[in-house]
């Protein structure tokens, strides 16, 4: 979501005719930090990066702006920790950037805009979108779930869905510019609920069906989903919309019902099992990803082992895992039975060992398959190679020409590694390998 917001800020400012994006901060007159508040580490990073960046500019006169969720949560406090910052703005206010910057130009200093209006933001953003082969479109913002550990409802505001027609127009515009894969974004994307211009209610499943009808869109993904908002319709789209990639990111956080209860997630382990079963019945090759938090207050060794057992049972293709980070203002910050840092570190390592083993096993199990891959760019690891992702979101590196970037090609998977796969382009490279 932050990446999406940053892209939109750049589009907005480029469109003013006053600003132009540059690749190197050394050439910038304005530097915007778009920030994340989800864990304490992300927040600390802002202040160390601000200081480092300012020092690297060696006294050059540059304006600094801080946007995103740290800006929303800290507001004016940011000026106290980094007095050289000129502008602070929340994630719902970046459409006002041109106006806020004008006020700075007119001589105002230390402006803080942290009002919350998701609706007006999208209306005010430019219609023009420029994406590469893959582009994101925000469809839902905010969260009403108030999980005990999480700051999102406080920084991103209440749950809100963008109107259907606005989303379809944005996707159409991207498709016209050559985008082939769309990522529908939301903090709880599967809670999407909005009407189209004819007054017809749409949930996420119907929105996906509509996006799939847009000419040029060959692949669709959506992130992030909540188990409580899963429904049968959403399972069925995996079975009957070929454009929808066989990948679902469905965070569970813990495999212990007691911990899930303390987290106030609103569902138990069995509810999650149910959706995994239904998804695998409908789309047998679906890749499943999840999020985990270790060391939530009250998580004892037995509860943690339930998480390990659950991971073994489900066999996730990919996962993000974090140490619980106490966030001021959330109910969990006041809870007893905090878990010691050293225990969190040890549990995270144990969990990640299991998750990584599964990921590598799943990658190796792909070897021999022929997959469609949307070529995203040149490989970072292997010089002379290009890379892209399979429908299941696995990264594949393979020999091929850069002219294939933006195209969907057939690739035979030849080697599974911990974080990626290697493969060969079916028509060219595979024949040659056969001959050898
Ligand atoms: N809405 C999504 C997740 C959004 S936040 C959901 O509910 O699944 C992204 C991830 O950050 C969460 O899934 C969680 O694993 C992690 N996270 C959120 N707050 C955290 C905290 N206080 N400490 C550690 N991890 C946290
Ligand atoms: Fe945070 Fe997700 Fe829970 Fe909302 S549903 S409070 S975003 S973890």
Image (spheres, rainbow, N blue to C red):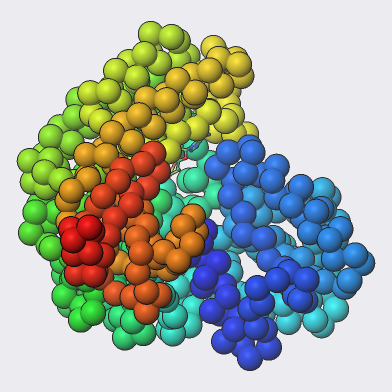
Residue 4 visible from this viewpoint? yes
Residue sitting at the far bottom: 17
Q: Quadrant of residue 305?
A: top left
Quarter of the image where the C terminus is located: bottom left
Q: Position of 253 compared to 412: left or right?
A: right
Query: Residue 244: horizontal and vertical position, in percent?
Result: 19, 60
Question: Left or right: where does residue 86 sit relative to residue 205?
Answer: right
Q: Residue at x 55, y 33 (%)?
A: 330
Image quadrant where residue 218 sits: bottom left
Q: Residue at x 53, y 46 (%)?
A: 154
Vertically, is 43 above or below 23?
above
What residue is drawn where x is 52% and y is 70%? 7
Q: Where in the figure is residue 359, as x and y percent of width and height?
A: 33, 36
Where 227 falls versus 27 (above or below)?
Answer: above
Determine whether 309 is above or below 197 in the image: above
> At 51% across and 65% down in the image, what residue appears?
5
- Relative depth, front residue between 410 and 79: 410
| Quadrant assignment for ligand 2 | top left
State the image coordinates of residue 82 (x, y, percent, origin top left). Answer: 82, 53
Q: Is residue 52 left or right of residue 314?
A: right
* Residue 138 makes an appearance in the image: no
Give how far across and how far down residue 165 sits, in percent: 27, 77
């Amino acid at each position: 979501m932050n990446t999406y917001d940053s892209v939109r800020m750049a589009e907005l400012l480029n469109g003013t005719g006053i600003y132009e994006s540059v690749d190197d901060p050394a050439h910038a007159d304005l530097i915007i930090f778009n920030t994340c508040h989800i864990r304490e580490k992300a927040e600390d990073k802002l202040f160390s990066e601000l200081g480092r960046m300012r020092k690297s500019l060696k006294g050059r006169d540059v304006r600094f702006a801080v946007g995103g969720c740290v800006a929303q949560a800290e507001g004016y406090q940011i000026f106290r920790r980094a007095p050289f910052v000129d502008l602070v703005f929340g994630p719902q206010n970046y459409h006002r950037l041109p106006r806020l910057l004008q006020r700075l130009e007119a001589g105002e200093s230390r402006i803080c805009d942290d009002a919350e209006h998701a609706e007006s933001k999208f209306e005010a953003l430019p219609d023009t979108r420029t994406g590469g082969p893959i582009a994101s479109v925000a469809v839902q913002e905010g969260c009403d779930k108030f999980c005990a550990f999480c700051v999102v409802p406080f920084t991103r505001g209440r749950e809100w869905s963008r109107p259907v027609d606005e989303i379809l127009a944005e996707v159409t515009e991207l498709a016209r510019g050559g985008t082939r894969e769309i990522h529908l974004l939301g903090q709880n994307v599967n809670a999407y609920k909005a009407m189209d211009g004819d007054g017809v209610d749409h949930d996420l499943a119907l929105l996906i069906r509509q996006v799939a009808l847009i000419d040029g869109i060959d692949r669709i993904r959506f992130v992030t989903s909540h188990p409580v908002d899963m429904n049968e319709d959403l399972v069925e789209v995996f079975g009957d919309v070929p454009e929808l990639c066989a990948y679902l990111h469905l965070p569970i956080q813990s495999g212990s019902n007691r911990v899930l209860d303390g987290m106030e997630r609103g569902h138990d382990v069995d509810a999650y099992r149910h959706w995994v079963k239904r998804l695998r019945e409908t789309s047998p090759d679906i890749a499943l990803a999840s999020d985990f938090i270790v060391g939530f207050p009250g998580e004892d060794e037995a509860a943690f082992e339930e998480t390990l057992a659950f991971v073994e049972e489900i066999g996730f293709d990919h996962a993000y895992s974090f140490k619980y980070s106490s966030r001021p203002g959330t109910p969990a910050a006041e809870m007893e039975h905090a878990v010691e840092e050293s225990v969190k570190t040890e549990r995270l390592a144990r969990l990640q060992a299991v998750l990584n083993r599964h990921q590598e096993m799943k990658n190796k199990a792909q070897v021999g398959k022929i997959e469609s891959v949307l070529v995203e760019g040149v490989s970072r690891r292997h010089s002379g190679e290009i890379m892209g992702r399979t429908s299941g979101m696995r990264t594949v590196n393979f020999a091929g020409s850069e002219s294939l970037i933006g195209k969907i090609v057939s690739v035979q998977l030849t080697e599974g590694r911990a974080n990626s796969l290697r493969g060969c382009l079916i028509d060219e490279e595979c024949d040659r390998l056969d001959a050898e």
